[in-house]
């Protein structure tokens, strides 16, 4: 089990314990509602809400080809979740690297942040940007898509 799943599992476990206590006291409605809240929180803080991660080296290789940003993230990070939610469907066009699953990705982030693992760190054209505005990231995605289309049309 990796670190990415510890917070979601603890949320479900704690929610189950509290819900069981409420259910034993006869409050089944609130127990079910509380359990659903904890399961929802676990889902939000799990890797499941992010597009599939790739390794840092593969993400950087793909980014060099298609010009799309690389986002270094980790599960449980509120700022990463904010970026993911604000990007919406555009998030599928970004290369995601989970630094808890990829040591090379963690090293890239530490190199960009004076040894800290501050995420989200977004790599655009080889330059790191720490916790950028989601609208700026969306603009970078759109710009990369335009350049890719122009490249195809000029061939």
Image (cartoon, grey):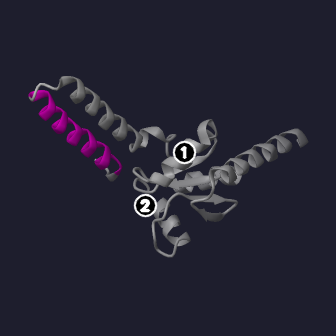
Indicate yes or no whether the magenta region holds residue 17: yes
Dividing the picture into quarters, in which one does residue 132 lie?
bottom right
Which badge, 2 or 1, comes first in the chain's sequence? 1
* Mark 2 and mark 1 residues within 8 Å of each other at the beta carbon: no
Give the residue at the far right of this rendering: 154
* SS at circle 1: helix
Q: In the rendered view, does 153 fall on the left or right side of 23?
A: right
Q: Residues within 10 Å of mark 2 (few under 14, many from 20)?
A: few
* SS at circle 2: helix
Q: Nearer the viewer, residue 66 or 145?
A: 145
Report how far apart the C-alphas of labels 2 and 1 lie in the structure.
Answer: 22 Å
Give the residue at the far bottom of this rendering: 114
| Pointer 2 residue | 103
| Pointer 1 residue | 84
Dividing the picture into quarters, in which one does residue 64 lie?
bottom right
Q: What is the span of residues highlighted in magenta in the rendered image? A: 4-24
- Label at residue 126: none
Dominant secondary structure of the residues highlighted in magenta in the image: helix
Q: Which percent across, then down, holds residue 13?
A: 21, 40
Q: In the rendered view, does 154 fall on the left or right side of 24?
A: right
| Residue at image point 32% right, 53% down | 3
């Amino acid at each position: 089990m990796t670190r990415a799943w510890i917070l979601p599992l603890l949320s479900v476990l704690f929610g189950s314990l509290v819900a069981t206590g409420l259910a034993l006291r006869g409050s089944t409605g609130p127990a079910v509602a509380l359990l659903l809240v904890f399961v929802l929180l676990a889902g939000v803080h799990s890797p499941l809400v992010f597009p599939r991660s790739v390794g840092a080296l593969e993400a950087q290789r793909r980014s060099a080809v298609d010009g799309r940003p690389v986002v270094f993230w980790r599960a449980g990070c509120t700022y990463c979740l904010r970026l993911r939610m604000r990007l919406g469907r555009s998030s599928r066009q970004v290369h995601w690297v989970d630094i808890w699953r990829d040591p090379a990705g963690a090293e890239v982030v530490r190199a960009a942040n004076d040894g800290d693992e501050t995420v989200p760190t977004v790599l655009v054209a080889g330059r790191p940007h720490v916790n950028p505005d989601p609208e700026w990231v969306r603009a970078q995605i759109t710009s990369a898509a335009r350049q890719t289309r122009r490249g195809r049309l000029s061939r």
